[in-house]
Image: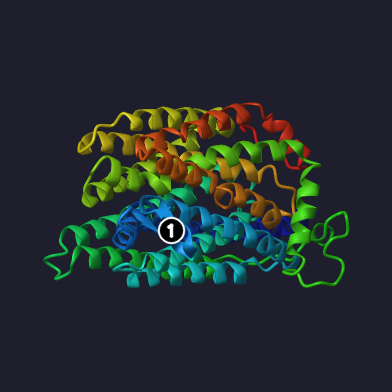
């Protein structure tokens, strides 16, 4: 009898080891989407496109310093910020359709591929941005940024499917670390090309356009790895349609996407603590995304720093963000994700306050500011993602993460709009940067009020030892 028990136990143990190995394989593939797309965020959005598109807009501006897209007078210095705002509004219109389609069909991977390669193609097309083609630059930015947002809905929705509750913080942090590692590596290559453009027989503008386009090629090349390793899962029937019956009328998933969004929002009212977290995240992450997208404009226009200085500063951010993401992941295991995020928000507010007083033409202080940003950037984003994954009911990952992504990117148009309007009214980038502090203060207050353990239990998920 004992021999039979042993024989029966061995296949179960082997199945368990095979399941763990399969989960690890998916996790490793999942990391590589951050590795692929983060180069767009670091090289394009954070370093090169803001100052370059601003210079292109200024070249096309009238005597008063205004360009006129669609006949609307826009100060050339605000065009980039407004383009970012439009891109996330476009993403808001698309993300609920994609999230509903992914959950109802169970086919996240083909949708991820479509979004990734649309964004990569638009980014590669930035090679043709030059002269006075500011409208082309704005259009490509809108397409690439919106595509990235849509792809992140699908990418993030895999997190609760490929990791156990106790793995979430570490898996999410490793994903961000992979992304920042890629960003740092490509920025080194960009710095070599930009600094030595004369020796390569290139103008400064041509070097910038090559750096922009190379981010698209990188994105497309490394997206192959997660698309090969991640796998689709069958939709859970009882989770496919909302309790109000939306999606059961026989309409195509994409057509009923907005019905599904309404159903999702109604369903989320059953989880008010999840909604409370989303509101806090919407606000403080709006500040994070605006700092990421506008820092290079602040450095070049207000602090009068050279492009090479900005590249080195962002490279410093990428390197320290790897350490920050992994370090804050360890802090979360010790003190919980919520407390660690709250500490990072306090650091964000202090960093922006210090940024307001930075003297112009002093790179060393800008590097110090970049170091402060790097240490909190990756960790605050990674832990927010993993914390939210505990608040999502099983089977509604893409649906709920579409709402999360609206908070992450889709509704992050308010910060750039505030930044752009502040500059348009005051003509001062210092006033624009200090206006963002309110996002971190209000986000801190709202997050501090969320009882996360009760929120996890209310979503029907197991509560980790530290949360």
Report the front residue among 85 and 283. 85
Relative to 316, residue 444 above or below? above
Q: Identify the coloring.
A: rainbow
- Residue 290 drawn at (x, y percent): 46, 44
- For image coordinates 46% across by 43% down, the residue present is 421
- For image coordinates 31% across by 58% down, the residue present is 52
Q: Quadrant of residue 110?
A: bottom right
Query: Could you tell me which quadrant the C terminus lies in?
Result: top right
- Residue 178 drawn at (x, y percent): 43, 53
As drawn, is 8 to the left or to the right of 448? Answer: right
- For image coordinates 69% across by 42% down, the residue present is 391
Question: How many numbered marks appear?
Answer: 1
Return the residue at label 1. Answer: 35
As drawn, is 141 to the left or to the right of 165? Answer: left
- Is residue 340 among the parts visible in the rendering? no
- Residue 107 drawn at (x, y percent): 67, 69
Relative to 346, residue 375 above or below? below
Label 1: few (<14), some (14–19) or many (≥20) C-alpha neighbours in 10 Å: many
Which residue ends up furthest to the left in the rendered image?
199
As drawn, is 196 to the left or to the right of 356? Answer: left
Circle 1 SS class:
helix
- Residue 90 drawn at (x, y percent): 58, 60
Which residue ends up furthest to the front in the rendered image?
63
Report the front residue among 277 and 239. 277
- Is residue 145 among the parts visible in the rendering? yes
Query: Could you tell me which quadrant the N terminus lies in?
Result: bottom right
- For image coordinates 72% across by 59% down, the residue present is 7
């Amino acid at each position: 009898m004992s021999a039979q028990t042993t024989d029966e136990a061995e296949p179960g143990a082997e199945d368990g080891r095979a399941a763990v190995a399969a989960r690890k394989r998916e996790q490793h593939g999942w990391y590589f989407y951050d590795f692929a797309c983060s180069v767009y965020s670091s090289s394009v959005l954070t370093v090169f496109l803001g100052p370059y598109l601003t210079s292109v807009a200024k070249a096309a501006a009238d005597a008063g310093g205004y360009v006129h897209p669609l006949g609307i007078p826009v100060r050339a210095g605000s065009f980039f910020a407004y383009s970012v705002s439009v891109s996330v509004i476009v993403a808001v219109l698309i993300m609920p359709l994609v999230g509903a389609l992914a959950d109802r069909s169970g086919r996240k991977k083909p949708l991820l591929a479509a979004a990734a390669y649309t964004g990569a193609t638009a980014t590669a097309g930035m090679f043709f941005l030059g002269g006075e083609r500011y409208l082309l630059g704005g259009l490509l930015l809108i397409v690439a940024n919106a595509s990235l947002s849509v792809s992140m809905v699908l990418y993030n929705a895999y997190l609760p499917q490929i990791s156990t509750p106790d793995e979430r913080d570490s898996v999410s942090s490793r994903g961000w670390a992979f992304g920042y590692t890629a960003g740092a590596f490509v920025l080194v290559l960009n710095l070599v090309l930009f600094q030595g453009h004369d020796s390569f027989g290139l103008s400064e503008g041509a070097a910038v356009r090559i750096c922009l386009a190379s981010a698209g090629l990188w994105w497309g090349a490394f997206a192959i790895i997660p698309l090969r390793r991640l796998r689709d899962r069958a939709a859970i029937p009882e989770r496919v349609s909302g309790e109000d019956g939306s999606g059961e009328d026989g309409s195509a998933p994409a057509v009923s996407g907005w019905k599904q969004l309404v159903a999702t929002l109604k369903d989320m009212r059953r989880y008010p603590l999840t909604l409370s977290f989303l509101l806090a995240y919407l606000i403080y992450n709006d500040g994070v995304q605006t700092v990421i997208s506008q820092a290079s404009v602040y450095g070049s226009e207000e602090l009068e720093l050279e492009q090479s200085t900005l590249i080195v500063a962002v490279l410093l951010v990428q390197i320290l963000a790897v350490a920050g993401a992994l370090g804050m992941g360890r802090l979360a295991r010790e003190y919980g994700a919520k407390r660690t995020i709250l500490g990072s928000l306090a650091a964000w507010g202090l960093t922006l306050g210090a940024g307001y007083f930075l003297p112009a033409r002093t790179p060393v202080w800008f590097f110090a500011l970049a170091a402060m940003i790097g240490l909190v950037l990756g960790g605050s984003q990674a832990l927010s993602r993993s914390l939210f994954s505990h608040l999502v009911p099983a089977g509604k990952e893409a649906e709920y993460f579409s709402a999360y992504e609206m908070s992450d990117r889709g509704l992050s148009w308010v910060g750039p709009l505030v930044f752009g309007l502040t500059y348009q009214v005051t003509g001062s980038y210092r006033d624009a940067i200090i206006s963002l502090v309110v996002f971190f203060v209000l986000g801190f207050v709202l997050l501090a009020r969320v009882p996360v353990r009760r929120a996890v239990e209310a979503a029907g998920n197991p509560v980790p030892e530290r949360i």
